[in-house]
Amino acid sequence: MKSILFVTVYTLSTVRLISLILAQPIGVLEIGELRHRIELGLSQTYGQQIGSFRLQQAKPGYAASGVIVAKFDDGLAIDITPCSEPKTILTFIMPYKDTQISEAECGNKSYPRRQVVQQ
C-alpha cells in the first residue's frame, strides 16, 4: 500500500514539474539572449542604438499595438512606445494573433504598426 502511494505521489510530482517547465514564459530563450535579440532589433528597426528599455510579457487576453522589433521561434517582441523613450517592449509567446493595423509616424519616418493579442 505504501509503495502504491509513493508511486502515485512521485508520478503527480513529476507531471507537475514537467508542466511547470513547459509553461516557462520566455520559451527556449534565456532572458539574456532575449534582451540581446531585442537590443539588436531595436537598433536595426530605428537605425540607432537605444539606451535602455523596459521588458514585459503579455498575459492571456492582453492586446497591444506597436512596432515588431524581434521575432523568435515561439514569439515576438513589440515596441509599444515607438515614438518615445524610454522604450517599453512587450513579448508575446505563441499562441497569439498578429495583424497589421496602420503606420506609426515618428518624425519623418514611418514604421508598420501591428496589433498583437495574446491567446
Image: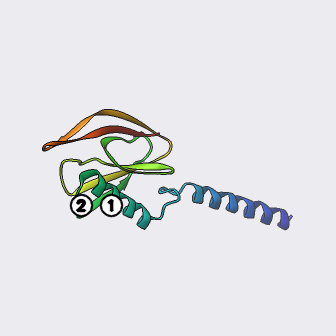
Horizontally, is 31 left or right of 1 in the view? Answer: left
Give the mark, 1 or 2, whose residue is nearer the N terminus: 1
- Choose between 117 and 9: the one closer to the eye: 117
User: What residue type is disc 2 on?
Assistant: Ile
Residue depicted at 34% across the width and 55% down the height: 41
Q: Quadrant of residue 20?
A: bottom right
Residue marked by disc 2: 50
- Choose between 95 and 42: the one closer to the eye: 42
Residue depicted at 29% across the width and 39% down the height: 112
Q: Residue 76, position in %: x, y?
A: 42, 49
Q: Residue 96, position in %: x, y?
A: 46, 40
Residue depicted at 42% across the width and 61% down the height: 34
Horizontally, is 82 left or right of 26 in the view? Answer: left
Scheme of colours in the image? rainbow
Residue depicted at 29% across the width and 59% down the height: 54
**What is the secondary structure assignment of the residue under circle 1?**
helix
Q: Which mark is residue 48?
A: none
The answer to the question of whether label 1 and label 2 lie on touching residues, with beta carbons closer than 8 A, is yes
* In the image, residue 6 above or below residue 68: below
Q: Quadrant of residue 14?
A: bottom right
* In the image, residue 1 above or below residue 61: below
Q: Residue 46, position in %: x, y?
A: 24, 52
Image quarter in which the N terminus is found: bottom right
Label 2 crowd (10 A; few <14 / some 14-19 / many >=20): some
Q: CA distance from mark 1 to mark 2?
A: 7 Å
Residue marked by disc 1: 39
User: What residue type is disc 1 on?
Assistant: Glu
Q: Quadrant of residue 107?
A: top left
